[in-house]
Image (spheres, coloured by chain):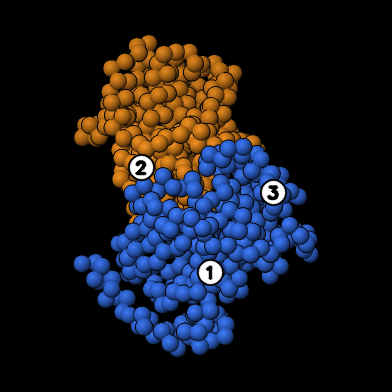
Amino acid sequence: MSFAAEVFCGFSAARVKALVVRYIYLLRSSWPRLFELIYWPAVQMITWGFIQRYLSHVGTAGGAAVVGAGTLIGAMLLWDILFRGQLGFSASFLEEMWSRNVGNLLMSPLRPMEFVAALTVMSVIRLVLGVVPVTLLAILFFGFNLWGLGLGLGAFFINLLLTSWSIGLLVSGLLLRNGLGAEGLAWTFMFMIMPLACVYYPVAVLPAWLQPIAWMLPPTYVFEGLRALLDQQVFRGDLMLQALGINVILFVGGTVAFVALLQSSRRAGTLLQVGE
Amino acid sequence: MAAVGGDGLVSPSRVPLVRAPAGASTRPAIAVEGLTKAYKTSLAVNDISFSVAPGSVTALLGGNGAGKTTTIGMVMGLVAPTRGTVRVLGVDMARNRYAVLHRMNFESPYVDMPHRLTVRQNLRVFANLYGVKRGEDRIAELAASLALDEFIDRQAGMLSAGQKTRVALAKALINTPEVLLLDEPTASLDPDTADWIRAELEAYRSTHGATILLASHNMAEVERLSDRVIIMRRGEIIADDTIPALLARFGRSSLEDVFLDVARARGHGAEAAVDAAPADAIAEIGR
């Protein structure tokens, strides 16, 4: 089947809904899965919140501000959107592999792009369930209101989600092609880009030769934009547009990789025997 | 439906097997032409051709590694052939499989249903994926005919092997498929449950005139269900005929003896393709 046919033919929202309902059944049936969505972001937020408070105290005592108000905790929350967005995508896909259901789905009329659409919807649902309560806790514990970023937050959110889906697509394709032996990628892939995405420090901290590479990653623009917003109260629309441009390329690349890896799995005969 | 078995299964009454109705299309339901699947170091299926008439049951019989599952996988479109074509209900599976997937279904021991979902939830998801109209009615129908009622609201992971097989069969029949692909449908079942499943398959085929392609190395299953048997070995078709014709050709009184002749490469017709050199064939395909 041609690439175009795999991607574009006969998209059905009803089939996407059917698969989303399947994942909601799963979340409803398992309190550990629901708990897992919230507890780690909460632990992270509390840890970084106290680090921020400590550094602010040291900075004030030394007569200089070390980090701007909320920069660390804000960066942590945005990083979690990026990480959890990808994990929400990949974990839903992994559920199909763990339950050996991939063959059933790919033999059904479900198109690969409908599968992808369902995974993106689940990524958003899992993010909302996991990150929203933690942002409310950040207000309660540290007086940091992520929602107060207003328009900026929307731009950050869209860009981070697009990056997370692109990586989710690539990781899911690799899982299809290589089986559960590649499962570790789903949990760790995002951490490969973390140092270059400059989550907790400005791009200027990186060596000059590394900075152009960092600027190839959309999250770098988001985290620079966050610091500009918190430290200088400036919303850098230019950074967000550049991030969006790279994200569009990444998303198309992720889609191409997913479909190519799916076709490669068909050639390798690995779809029927999804395992290690 | 008639007798209730020892484990509470309701056995469907034996029904006569039917051929395709008179006047029905003579186009094969499944047409396989020159099908080959080569992996890097092995040749799983080597240039096989066969067709399956509408409303008939054809069994792919062979030992482990004969190429049955790979063949079924290629018919389903889950495994891409190296060469050759598969047409299901006239549709080329390599080019246009989505035009026909809603009219077929399958059951295989290589796949499972999500364990945390209840049987009803699983069937509901697949009814929606296959676009089944009045899905809840269809689920109720299948629950009654496959005796799922007592555990339909239980999680799929909590079921016994026999119950799981019945649920897998319910999923395979959810869209009332015209073409049903079965890979070892009664593997690991006790004889009573296996017999019951076979009776259900006969009943479904009889009622709906469905075409069934069955991969198995269970002789009882093949003898009971199949109109025709394709015997495979090392990825090639060794024999393709009705059971009486196969018994006559191999001079045997049971299909099991025929199978053993083929497996051990003895008797009429068994030698033919058995000693083909797969390595040469792989090299040829590689060129």
Whole-angstrom CA distance, mark 3 to mark 2, is 34 Å
Q: Is residue B17 above or below residue B178?
A: below
Label 2 belongs to which residue?
Answer: A6
Label 3 belongs to which residue?
Answer: B143
Q: Position of residue A243 (x, y in %)?
A: 31, 25
Label 1 belongs to which residue?
Answer: B227
Q: Is residue B279 above or below residue B177?
A: below
Nearer to the camera, B253 or B287:
B253
Q: Looking at the colours in the rendered structure, which chain would you say is drawn in blue? A: B
Mark 2 crowdedness (10 Å alpha carbons): few <14, some 14-19, many ≥20 = some
Nearer to the camera, A184 or B276:
B276
Q: Position of residue B72 (x, y in %)?
A: 45, 61
Mark 3 crowdedness (10 Å alpha carbons): few <14, some 14-19, many ≥20 = many
Most extreme residue toward the top is A233
Q: Amino acid at mark 2?
A: Glu
Q: Chain of mark 1?
A: B
Q: Looking at the colours in the rendered structure, which chain would you say is drawn in orange? A: A
Mark 1 crowdedness (10 Å alpha carbons): few <14, some 14-19, many ≥20 = some
